[in-house]
Image: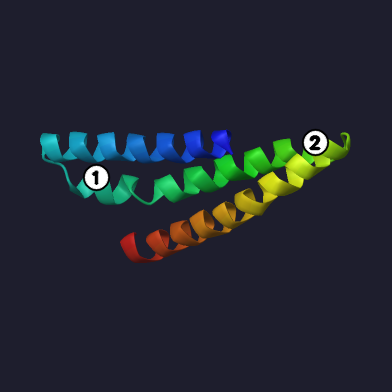
Amino acid sequence: MVAAFVLIAGVLLTMLVAAVAFAWAGSLDMLMFVLPWSPLVIAIGTFLLMLTELLLLFGRGEDRKAALRDFAYLFPTFLVSGGLFLLAWHYLW
């Protein structure tokens, strides 16, 4: 759960810094190019975290319980961020 929080917070913080930098530089049109990439980066990172959790399914009972608990929030995060990317791609590009 900590890894997913760090992933999402890191991507959002990076996008916030990029938005401020583009606004300061006067090129807000670049923001519409960069903005849709944040949900995609979150979806890819969440997918990689799910692959890591898949390895825990081959462990002991506690590892399997932890993996299933982590899948319970990683899979919806993956679906929502993938859907947000598709919406952003459709409406912003």
Q: Number of labelled discs?
A: 2
User: Label 1, on which residue?
Assistant: 30
Could you say where residue 9 lies in the image, as x and y percent from the top left? Answer: 42, 38
Amino acid type at circle 1 is Met
Could you say where residue 77 lies in the image, as x and y percent from the top left? Answer: 55, 53
- In space, the residues marked 2 and 1 are separated at their CA atoms by 39 Å
Quadrant placement of the N terminus: top right
Residue occupying image coordinates x 88% and y 34%: 60
Question: Residue 66's image quarter?
Answer: top right
Residue occupying image coordinates x 49% and y 33%: 6
Of helix, strand and loop, which one carries label 1?
A: helix
Q: Are marks 2 and 1 in contact (CB under 8 Å)?
A: no
Check residue 55 in the rendering and tell me which mark sits there, or answer none: 2
Amino acid type at circle 2 is Leu
Question: Residue 53's image quarter?
Answer: top right
Could you say where residue 61 lies in the image, as x and y percent from the top left? Answer: 87, 39
Residue occupying image coordinates x 75% and y 42%: 67
Of helix, strand and loop, which one carries label 2?
A: helix
Depth order, front residue of 12/59: 59
Q: Does 67 sit left or right of 89 as displayed?
A: right
Could you say where residue 83 lies in the image, as x and y percent from the top left? Answer: 50, 62
